[in-house]
Image (cartoon, helix red, strand yellow):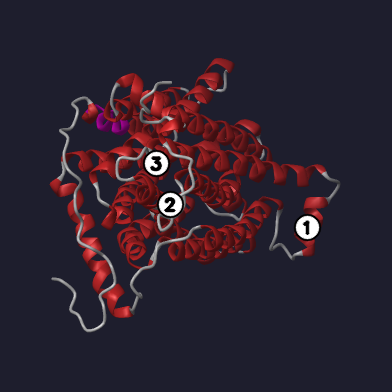
């Protein structure tokens, strides 16, 4: 997840008007795109800061790989359970409120990670982070698409903005992992700085927990920006009765999405394959880095550098997404190409497991980069197809269904990878899943009208929700 000619083409900046918005039409698309990019960057920066040290921090607290896989499963399953209710909630009460709530939950989760070492506290933090992931999976993108459509119409270019948002997310993750991996290493360079920090806090704060605490501060900035920079059109007052009546309708509509439209089924399966790929990469790579370097802090720095390079590859892939669609002559074929690149990367990571030779290391690093490059290419093209098939009444719900598919498969794949013996098998299984789903895009889906979803708006007082 994740810019010529006289006639503007999809992906051209020229296809987005830069004139001031007429009265009543809200922000112009360029301003909306800049704010969408900023929100994407601020949300994912603290998450990136926790990626480099998360597994190693939990290991340093005395927890095993199976327990850590369980923590990630709590995150994924919580996000999956909350995806549809919170997607519908965004369609009911507005994108801004839901996004701000996500930031506050993440702030609490990062504080728990930084200060607590007990398994119950980490489990609680993972659950809160899963709720935040569910809350954030659709509202920002839905706000951007709605704003552009309100100003420029339903045929306005979306792919460029979605690609820039994906690039901002990847850049934030890259910078965050570099900061998160570098801070513990820098604290270890100073004479006794890390030991002083641990002693001064009675063991609550250790060098590996500093990135999580800094991430909590960034989340506060994110919340303030969301509340001040994302205007929305007036909505009917959201009452408890309206929420109770509107959200279930949105959930039911979301569950029916994949059943009645072949293209949306492919989108959901593609998200599932991405979840399998990411689960394998995020769970298994930190341990490989620590084993190669010999210590947790050095392993965190190596993994941070590797993850930074991976996210930069994802940003590059997102920037290339419009060009990939033009080169392959359709978004469907661009998704196919991106999936093939991901499968190749996972295969390289699998066949190099257990070897530390220079050639094997170079191949593994290349494979890691290819995974993120392919995901970056596929993401904006997949979402472009989704937005053109789903109307605005349930756009956030549709995005939540997509994220639900990713989270459910990520949870199962993570548990499987943690239970399987270390070696090439987990990597190759993930590669097989990604390749099988990518091949579904060989045949182009038939064009169709937008799928209307039942309205998930608050029910006015005195009325009865539609059944």
The residue that disc 1 covers is 197
In this rendering, which labeled residue sits more in front, label 1 or label 3?
A: 1
Placement of the C terminus among the 4 image quadrants = bottom left
- Between discs 1 and 3, the one toward the N terminus: 1
130 displayed left or right of 408: right
Please rate how many residues cluster around mark 3, counting C-alpha atoms within 10 Å: few if below 14, some from 14 to 19, many from 20. Answer: many
Indicate the position of residue 247 as horizontal and vertical percent values: 27, 67
The residue that disc 2 covers is 22
Question: What secondary structure characterizes most of the magenta part?
Answer: helix
In this rendering, which labeled residue sits more in front, label 2 or label 1?
A: 2
Please rate how many residues cluster around mark 2, counting C-alpha atoms within 10 Å: few if below 14, some from 14 to 19, many from 20. Answer: few
Label ID, residue 417:
3
Name the image quarter holding residue 437: top left
Magenta stretch bounds = 432-439
Indicate the position of residue 273 as horizontal and vertical percent values: 32, 38
Placement of the N terminus among the 4 image quadrants = top left
Q: Is residue 273 above or below residue 424?
A: below
14 displayed left or right of 448: right
């Amino acid at each position: 997840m994740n810019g010529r000619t006289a006639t503007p083409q999809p992906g051209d900046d020229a296809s987005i008007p830069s004139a001031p918005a007429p009265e009543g039409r809200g922000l112009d698309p360029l301003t909306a795109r800049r704010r969408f990019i900023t929100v994407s960057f601020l949300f994912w920066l603290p998450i990136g800061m926790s990626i480099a040290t998360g597994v190693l921090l939990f290991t340093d607290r005395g927890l095993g790989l199976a327990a850590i896989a369980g923590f990630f499963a709590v995150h994924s399953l919580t996000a999956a359970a909350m995806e549809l209710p919170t997607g519908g909630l965004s369609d009911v009460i507005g994108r801004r409120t839901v996004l701000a709530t996500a930031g506050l939950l993440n702030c609490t989760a990062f504080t728990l990670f930084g200060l607590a070492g007990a398994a119950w506290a980490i489990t609680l933090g993972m659950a809160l982070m899963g709720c935040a992931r569910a809350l954030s999976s659709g509202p920002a993108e839905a706000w951007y698409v709605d704003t552009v459509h309100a100003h420029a119409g339903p045929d306005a270019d979306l792919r460029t903005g979605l690609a820039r948002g994906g690039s901002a997310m990847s850049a934030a993750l890259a910078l965050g992992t570099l900061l998160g991996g570098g801070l513990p290493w820098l604290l270890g360079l100073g004479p006794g700085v890390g030991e002083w920090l641990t002693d001064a806090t009675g063991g609550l704060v250790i060098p590996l927990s500093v990135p999580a605490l800094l991430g909590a501060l960034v989340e506060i900035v994110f919340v303030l920006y969301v509340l001040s920079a994302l205007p929305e059109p007036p909505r009917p007052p959201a009452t408890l009765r309206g929420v109770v009546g509107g959200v279930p309708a949105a959930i039911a509509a979301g569950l029916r999405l994949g059943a009645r439209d072949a293209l949306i089924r492919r989108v959901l399966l593609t998200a599932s394959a991405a979840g399998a790929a990411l689960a394998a990469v995020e769970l298994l790579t930190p341990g490989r880095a620590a084993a190669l370097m010999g210590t947790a802090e050095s392993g965190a720095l190596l993994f941070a550098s590797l993850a930074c390079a991976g996210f930069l590859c994802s940003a590059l892939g997102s920037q290339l997404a419009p060009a990939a669609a033009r080169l392959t002559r359709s978004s469907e074929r661009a998704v196919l190409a991106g999936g093939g690149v991901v499968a190749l990367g996972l295969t390289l990571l699998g066949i190099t497991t257990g070897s530390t030779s220079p050639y094997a290391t170079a191949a593994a690093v290349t494979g890691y980069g290819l995974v993120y490059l392919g995901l970056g290419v596929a993401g904006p093209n997949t979402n472009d197809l989704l937005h053109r098939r789903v109307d605005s009444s349930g756009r956030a719900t549709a995005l939540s269904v997509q994220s639900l598919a990713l989270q459910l498969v990520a949870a199962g794949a993570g548990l499987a990878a943690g239970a399987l013996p270390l070696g090439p098998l987990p990597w190759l299984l993930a590669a097989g899943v990604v390749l099988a789903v990518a091949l579904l895009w060989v045949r182009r889906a038939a064009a169709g009208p937008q799928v209307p979803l039942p309205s998930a708006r608050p029910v006015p007082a005195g009325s009865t929700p539609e059944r």
